[in-house]
Image (cartoon, rainbow, N blue to C red):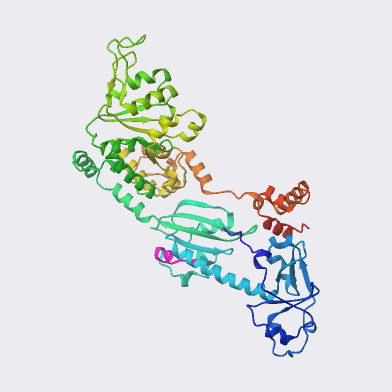
Amino acid sequence: MHKGFLTVKEMLYKDLLPVTPDETIGEIREKGVPNRPIVLVTDDARLVGIMLWKDAINLNLEPNIPVKQVMKRDFSVLDEEDLDREILAFLPELRYHALVCRNHKKEILGVLSYDQVFNDLALRVCETEARINAVVETVDEAICIVDKNDIVTTWNSRAEELYGIKAKDIIGKPVHKYFTNLVVTRVNKEWQEIRSLHHQPVKGTHVLINATPVRLGPKVIGGVTAERDVTEIVQLNQKLNQASFRVQRLEKEINKFSADRNPFAGIKGHHKKLVDLVNVARKAAFTNAVVLLRGESGTGKELFAKAIHEASSRADKNFSVINCAAIPPSLFESEMFGYEGGAFTGADRKGKTGVFETANGGTLFMDEIGELPLDMQVKLLRVLQDGVFFRVGGSIPIKVDVRIIAATNRLLEDMMSKGTFREDLYYRLNVVSLEIPPLRERREDIPELVYLFLQEFSQLYNKQISKLDPGVMATFLAYSWPGNIRQLKNVVERMVILTEGDTVPEDSIPEALKTNSRQDQATAATGLASVTEQTERELIIRTLKQVNGNRSEAARMLGIPRSTLYYKMHQLGIM
């Protein structure tokens, strides 16, 4: 990404034409007309003057006039270390004479002249404008860009469609003339960065909005918003929730007994990552391949496991579950493989069947597989390879046909490197791996899930709740949901219990949710831009002293590009 300003190196003009002082204007003209060159006049390798090509071809000059009579002797010299400084710092000086940049060997690297820099800057402005227009018309979001005075400078065709306002009508005018509930002005004034915030800029329109301040060095010169229309999703879920509870119960019963029902219908959401995962899981279901479900707690790993089982040819067999994190290490083997009567003190005299036997012919879901002790990992690997195990205290091999689906929220790769998870077992389990995204990465699905849980708990507690206060959904969409769908479901249940009318009120939102949502919405400015001018000056001076004036090292310690350090020093008068 471009740093936001141009350096001397980027603007340096290198198309140079060397001549001697005694050459005539006519001789220079005979050399042809290169692409806007700068003429360097040297005497015995010593630079004595500069002349622009436009002066050389000036028809008012006689051809026999020597160059030394018309060349400009007034120029300044820049050192190689100035290459990374900002070009704007040199514009006042360029108005009076050209600048020649040399390296430590006194070799000329290039020249800056006022006309050349002005033309290049004008061209870059036009090119940048063209690129911005191409970008804003390529994305699917509605894009709005305002300047530091909240005047609209960019308004793409998607924004025209979303709000019914033509670009020609809004560009050049204050954005608040058309909207009252604004996010773009907030990022402009408060330096906030907004990500996936639910927003209602006008009545009846719901969007998820990203907003970022436009920075030029230490200053904010405007703001950009990108808005994705989710109005249809929100309204559709509201209408679905308000439908008859009786019809919904009947549909549920019909789906239960329908021969061609969709086992994955219980996995709610339409985010692309989720849809792709369901497609992969659906394909894996028709095989006997081991499936490894990965993701944070509460993302719905067991729901995926049940759907895979129900979509497989084993759907009419047992679906057994064992939580590896909930069983004491001393009981793992007997829980998994069972035991013979009298195998150990306290054992049932009739013996006990383990989960592998229970799941024979069906599916065994091993949750939190990363918690499996190392000795049990060896035995599990043997069962996966041979399909045979022994009960605790038994000597007769038991043959089983079990499809394994494992799940974990841990990084098994890190565990392998530390020796706490066997590499051979990892590769045995990692045949089909599904990474279930956390809820914060699929915020578009939150409205659908909220109204689904609202309907479920309204029926459970015999209530007729069908609506939410606007602030409720806004808070839900802004919150990061560390507990994922499980946490969302628990919060909705609590709010349904506390609600007395047909609308969930905003004051029923748990206080922790409100606090964390506000923290999630705003990203505080950090680094040099967050301190006062005096503090900036003291910090830069102190850092330069620590590194004995080495500007490159000072910039690295401050965490900013060297060119930004030059700019700050220039602005703060540090020489």
Left or right: 230, with 155 as reference point: left
Q: Is residue 462 visible to us here?
A: no
Q: Residue 356 in the image: x percent, y percent?
A: 30, 24
Quarter that holds the C terminus: bottom right
Which residue is at a point 58% across and 64% down the rendered structure image? 149
Give x and y (percent) for residue 5.
63, 62
- In the picture, residue 453 is in which quadrant? top left
> Which stretch did the figure color magenta?
153-162
Identify which residue is drawn at 35% across, 53% down.
233
Q: Position of residue 318 (x, y in %)?
A: 25, 29
Confirm whether the magenta stretch covers residue 468. no
For residue 455, above or below residue 356: below
Judged left or right of residue 110, residue 180 is: left
User: Quick check: 215 left or right of 334?
Assistant: right
Is residue 529 or residue 505 the one in the foreground? 529
Viewer-side residue, 82 vs 38: 38
- Could you tell me which residue is drawn at 48 percent across and 64 percent down? 135
Position above or below: 375 against 198: above
Residue at point 32% right, 26% down?
A: 386
Q: Quadrant of the N terminus?
A: bottom right
Asked where in the image residue 307 lies, by quadrant, the reply is top left
State the count of labels: 0
The image position of residue 277, as x and y in percent, is 36, 44
Residue 506 shows in the view: yes
155 in magenta = yes
Magenta segment main secondary structure: helix
